[in-house]
Image (spheres, rainbow, N blue to C red):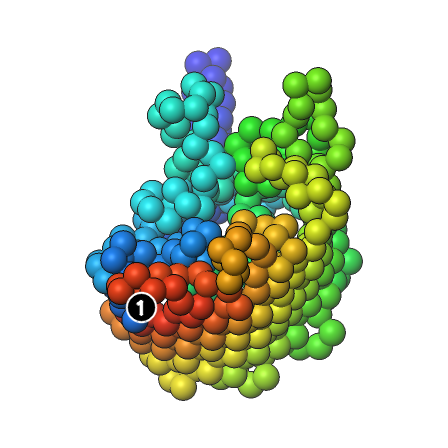
Amino acid sequence: MKKSIFTLLLSGISFLGFSQEKEAESSKFTFSGYIDSYYMLNFNNPTNRSNLGTSGYERAFDQKSNQFSIGLVQTKFGYATKTSDVVVDLTFGPNADLGQYGNVVGPLGAGKASTALAIKQAYFNWKPSDKWTFTVGQFGTHIGYEVIDAPVNYNYSLSNLFNNGPFYHIGAKANYAFSSKSALMLGIVNNVDNLNDNNSSKGFIGQFFFAPKEGWNVYINGITSNESAPLASGKDDSGSYNLLDLTTSYQVTPKYLIGLNAAYGSQTGDFQGGGSVGDSKTWGGVALYSNYAFTDHFSLGGRYEVFDNTSGARALRGINAAGETVGTDVSSFTLTATFTTAEGHLLIKPEIRTDAYKTAQFVDGDGKSQKSQATFGTVFIYKF
């Protein structure tokens, strides 16, 4: 009897060990991240050493000039099994604060410390089948060509389309893959770029992906939401925020890639307490991308963009000849070289960018108004 019990115990221990080995084989833990820093020279030589102009929205993250600046520090954790995975993407530094600005007001209220400000993404995926994926949590937006993660983009400075679109959402979404060449995503989110819902409405997001041919990817993205802050009398139903976005890229040759991002948005009423814009006003733009990898260690990426906010729907505004604050439009050109070294971990990116507006956006070192701005910077990104 004792021998039988002993044998049973050994069998149980062996089974547990086998189960743990099987679980270890089917699961994977990952850790990655990056740090970036830059020096940006502004040829207008503004006395405040800032690339931001009159509206404060002329640049997204590379806001400082004529000084060394820290960008972002990322620590990204992942755990995956055959049918699920979880991502905890924590970031710190000036660009993290700018990217997660809507998380600044945590459970303790305004003016209190908020650890939520460090959360760039925190979500899990459940994959009950090869075709279905369900996602819940805080995740980066599906809108646009560019992302917050500096190593992923060809250019370091971010486009006006990126700066005037959503950064992230909190909610749930479902993705159905019809095949490896087409998929549909639909979701419901609190609102745009906020830890807490600013009203009782919900936003709806969607994306349709298809690949017409090998190397060509197309994404049609959208969001519609009531972003109005509530009135003293209750819910404000007048606010409507809508954005339709097209993102596509084509790998022409193994070395040469071209891309395009086009977006058209509209806003009616109030946007998160920023004041009512009245009847529907629109904005939009187009950005063209080109990147050529000369070698494994050197590539050159260009971006030309036009962005139109003449209606004043978004925060990017200028000053006209009469000294009035009005909507504006801008054309921008960015050229970025990427040198890859240190076994692929270190990216060195010299970059030149010009922005030309139809309205006065900047003030130079002599106090004169300027409609354009040119910057040259060198960026250092270490990824791991």
Q: Nearer the viewer, residue 23 or 87?
A: 87
- Residue occupying the point 52% across, 58% down: 322
Q: How many marks?
A: 1
Going by the picture, which residue comes out furthest to the front? Answer: 322
143 over 153 or under it: above or below: above
Viewport quadrant of the C terminus: bottom left
Compared to residue 103, the image places residue 3 above or below, namely above
Q: Residue at x 70, y 39 (%)?
A: 269
Q: Residues within 10 Å of mark 1 (few under 14, many from 20)?
A: many
Q: Amino acid at mark 1?
A: Asn
> Relative to 117, is 30 above or below?
below
Identify the secondary structure beneath mark 1.
loop
66 with respect to 333 (left or right): left
Which residue is rendered at x = 63% and y = 30% of the image? 229
Q: Quadrant of residue 383?
A: bottom left
Q: Position of residue 34 (x, y in %)?
A: 33, 54
The residue closer to the viewer here, 37 or 40, is 40
Quadrant in the picture for residue 36? bottom left
Residue at numbered disc 1: 44
Is any atom of residue 3 visible in this view? no
Q: Position of residue 356 (x, y in %)?
A: 48, 71
Q: Position of residue 41 (x, y in %)?
A: 27, 67
Give left or right: position of 33 versus 247. left
**Residue 8 position in % (x across, y down):** 49, 23
Displayed quadrant of residue 50: bottom left
